[in-house]
Image (cartoon, rainbow, N blue to C red):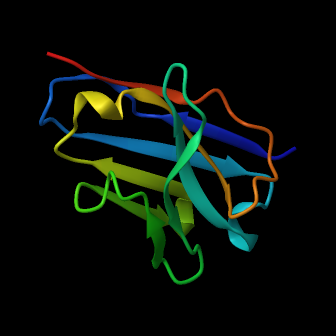
Amino acid sequence: QVQLVESGGGLVQPGGSLRLSCATSGGIYSTNAMGWYRQAPGKQRELVAAIAITSGSSIRYADSVKGRFTISRDNAKNTVYLQMNSLKPEDTALYYCNTYPRVVIDWGQGTQVTVSS
């Protein structure tokens, strides 16, 4: 059974940093590009960043996070990361990972990121 387990969220002050992790299982990791998505209260889920698993090249970033967030992966650990720097209150959301560009896996529980002073 394919599983996605997100972790690393928390409460951070504006300007702070967090690193999110997405552990994958079930074989999906080696066959798909992966993405980080987020959903803020009252808003639709949106793509934050995506990465090609084989090459490790980033595919895209949302305009709102360019220059602040970096997506990466560790193939040995079947894990995708999202390094988030210079966090802003508007980054507050529940963050998820999944395949990209098509979401083919049941969503995990996500990890909450709250940016507040």
Q: Residue 67 or 99: which is nearer the viewer? A: 67
Residue at left offset 81%, top offset 47%: 2
User: Quadrant of residue 37 in the image?
Assistant: top right
Residue at left offset 33%, top offset 34%: 91
Vertical placement of 25 versus 55: above or below?
Answer: above
Vertical placement of 63 versus 115: above or below?
Answer: below
Q: Quadrant of the N terminus?
A: top right
The residue lying furthest to the top in this view is 117
Q: Is residue 68 left or right of residue 39?
A: left
Q: Residue 96 or 60: which is nearer the viewer? A: 60
Vertical placement of 56 versus 22: above or below?
Answer: below
Q: Is residue 4 visible?
A: yes
Where residue 11 sits in the image (x, y, percent)? Answer: 28, 19
Where residue 22 sits in the image (x, y, percent)? Answer: 54, 46
Q: Is residue 78 visible?
A: no
The residue lying furthest to the bottom in this view is 55
The residue lying furthest to the right in this view is 1
Count of numbered badges drawn on the protein: 0
User: Quadrant of residue 78 in the image?
Assistant: bottom right
Where residue 39 sits in the image (x, y, percent)? Answer: 54, 32
Where residue 76 sits in the image (x, y, percent)? Answer: 55, 66
Residue at left offset 60%, top offset 34%: 44
Q: Quadrant of the C terminus?
A: top left
Q: Is residue 24 left or right of residue 67?
A: right
Residue at left offset 22%, top offset 38%: 87
